[in-house]
Image (spheres, helix red, strand yellow):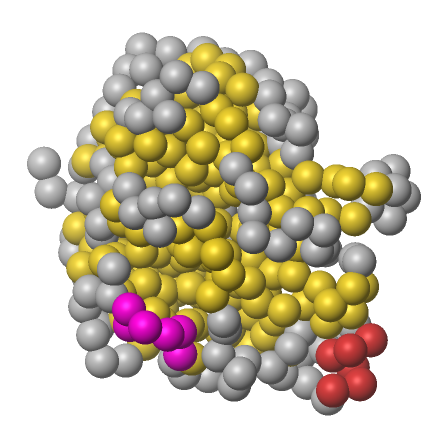
C-alpha cells in the first residue's frame, strides 16, 4: 500500500490458528460473490492483501503447489503468473503501483509495475512486510536456530531494504525464543513490529511482544500487565506517533488448561498505543469459545478494521469508530471460514482475505470487500 500513516500491511494473519485467518461494487447479500474459487485455484489459502486504489489491489497466499500472487483490476481477481515460486507467501505491501513487496517462506519478491521478480532469499520465514518508500521497507518473521527438523527453536527475524539491498537488522532480544508476525511503519523513525516470545526456549507461556523502531534501533516496549498469558499478537498498524493498534488472541480459560494447551478457550485481544504506553481495549464478546484476530488496518484514527475467526466456523470482522469496537456482520457461508488479513483504503473500500472450507470439500480462497455499507464475497 502507498504507505501513508493510515494503512499497514498485516502479517500472515491467523497462521497459528488455521494451520494448527468508479465506486466499489454493491454488496451481495449473505451469499457467494460473482467469482468462484476457480479464479485463484482450489486448495488455496490467502494470507495477505493490500489495496492501492479502487482498481489496484494485491493478495498473496499459498496453494497446494506453491505461492499465490493475485491481482484486482477493478473488475475481477486473477492470478499473476510472472513469478513462479514453490514457497508460500504470507504478506504483501505496496508503496505505489510500481513498487510492491511480497514476503514468505525463504522469499522476498518485488513488483516493478510490469512483472514480479525474486529480490532476496532470506534464511527464515517472513510473515509481515511494510513499505514506506522505495528506499525504506521492513520485513519480519522467524528463523530456526536449533533442532530445526524435530522441535525447532525460533528466533525473531528482522530485515530492511534501503533501496539497494536487503539486510538483517539486530533484534533487541538475541537468544530469546520469539517470533514476529506483523510490522507497520508510519515514518522513517516510527515503526512497530509485534509477535510473541516464550519464557524458555520453545516452551512455557507465550508472551505478547511489542518492538518499536525509533530511526536508529529496535527496542522492546512493555505490554499491559492486564493481558493474560499465554497470548500472542498477530497484527499491528501505526496510525501516527501517538496512535497505533495491535491485535491477537489470549487464553481465557482455566489457568491449568492455558498452561498445558488443553484446547483452551481463547479471546480476541486489542492493544492501543497513545504515544506513551500500550493499554488493553475491550472488544465485543461473541458466542464462540475460541476467537482470534490476525490483522488490523486503519483508514483514519476513527476508522480501524480488524479481522479473524472463531470456533463457530465463522469469520470475524470488527470496526473501531473512535469510541468503541463493534462487530460488523460478514456474509454467511456453508462450511467454515476465516479471515487472515485486511487492508482498508477508504471508508468505502476495504478488502479482507482468508480461507473457506465447504462441506466435504478442499480448502478454497476467500476474498471479501467492504463498500461502506456491507461486506460481500468476491471470491470463494
In the rendered view, tell whether residue 58 sits above or below residue 85: below
Position in image of residue 164 (x %, y %): 39, 17
Question: In the figure, is residue 349 to the left or right of 354?
Answer: left
User: Is residue 366 a member of the stretch shown in magenta?
Assistant: no
View extreme (front): residue: 216
The one nearer the camera, 294 or 326, is 294
Q: Tell how many labels.
A: 0
Position in image of residue 312 (x %, y %): 58, 71
Question: In the figure, is residue 254 to the left or right of 92?
Answer: right
**Toward which corner of the image does residue 306 lie, by quadrant?**
bottom left
User: Is residue 275 a member of the stretch shown in magenta?
Assistant: yes
The one nearer the camera, 349 or 214, is 214
Position in image of residue 112 (x %, y %): 32, 15
The one nearer the camera, 160 or 294, is 160
Position in image of residue 339 (x %, y %): 48, 54
In the image, which residues are magenta?
Answer: 274-279
Quadrant position of the N terminus in the picture: top left
View extreme (bottom): residue: 254
Q: Determine the residue positioned at 20% across, 74% down.
A: 322
Q: Determine the residue positioned at 35% across, 21% down.
A: 163
Amino acid at each position: 500500500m502507498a504507505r501513508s500513516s493510515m494503512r499497514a500491511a498485516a502479517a500472515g494473519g491467523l497462521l497459528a490458528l488455521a494451520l494448527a485467518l468508479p465506486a466499489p461494487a454493491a454488496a451481495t447479500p449473505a451469499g457467494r460473490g460473482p467469482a468462484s474459487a476457480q479464479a485463484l485455484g482450489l486448495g488455496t489459502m490467502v494470507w495477505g492483501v493490500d489495496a492501492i486504489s479502487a482498481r489496484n489491489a494485491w493478495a498473496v497466499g499459498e496453494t497446494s503447489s506453491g505461492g499465490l500472487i493475485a491481482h484486482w483490476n477493478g473488475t475481477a481477481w486473477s492470478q499473476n503468473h510472472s513469478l513462479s515460486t514453490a514457497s508460500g507467501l504470507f504478506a504483501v505491501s505496496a508503496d505505489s503501483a510500481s513498487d510492491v513487496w511480497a514476503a514468505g517462506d525463504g522469499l522476498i519478491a518485488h513488483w516493478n509495475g510490469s512483472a514480479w521478480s525474486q529480490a532476496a532469499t532470506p534464511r527464515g520465514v517472513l510473515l509481515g512486510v511494510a513499505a514506506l518508500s522505495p528506499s525504506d521497507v521492513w520485513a519480519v518473521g522467524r528463523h530456526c536456530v536449533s533442532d530445526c527438523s524435530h522441535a525447532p527453536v525460533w528466533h525473531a527475524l528482522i530485515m530492511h531494504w534501503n533501496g539497494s539491498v536487503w539486510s538483517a537488522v539486530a533484534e533487541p532480544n538475541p537468544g530469546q525464543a520469539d517470533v514476529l508476525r506483523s510490522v507497520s511503519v508510519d515514518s522513517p523513525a516510527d515503526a512497530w513490529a509485534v509477535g510473541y516470545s516464550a519464557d524458555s526456549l520453545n516452551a512455557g507461556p507465550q508472551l505478547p511482544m511489542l518492538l518499536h523502531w525509533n530511526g536508529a534501533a529496535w527496542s522492546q516496549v512493555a505490554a499491559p500487565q492486564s493481558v493474560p498469558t499465554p497470548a500472542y499478537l498477530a497484527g499491528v498498524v501505526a496510525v501516527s506517533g501517538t496512535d497505533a493498534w495491535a491485535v491477537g488472541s489470549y487464553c481465557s480459560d482455566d489457568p491449568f488448561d492455558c498452561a498445558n494447551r488443553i484446547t483452551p478457550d481463547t479471546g480476541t485481544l486489542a492493544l492501543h498505543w497513545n504515544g506513551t504506553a500500550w493499554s488493553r481495549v475491550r472488544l465485543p464478546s461473541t458466542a464462540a469459545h475460541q476467537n482470534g484476530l490476525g490483522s488490523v488496518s486503519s483508514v483514519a484514527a476513527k476508522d480501524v478494521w480488524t479481522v479473524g475467526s472463531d470456533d463457530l466456523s465463522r469469520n470475524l470482522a470488527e470496526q473501531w469508530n473512535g469510541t468503541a469496537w463493534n462487530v460488523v456482520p460478514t456474509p454467511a457461508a456453508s462450511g467454515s471460514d476465516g479471515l487472515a488479513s485486511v487492508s482498508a483504503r477508504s471508508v468505502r473500500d476495504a478488502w479482507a482475505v482468508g480461507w473457506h472450507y465447504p462441506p466435504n470439500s478442499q480448502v478454497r480462497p476467500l476474498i471479501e470487500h467492504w463498500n461502506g455499507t456491507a461486506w460481500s464475497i468476491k471470491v470463494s
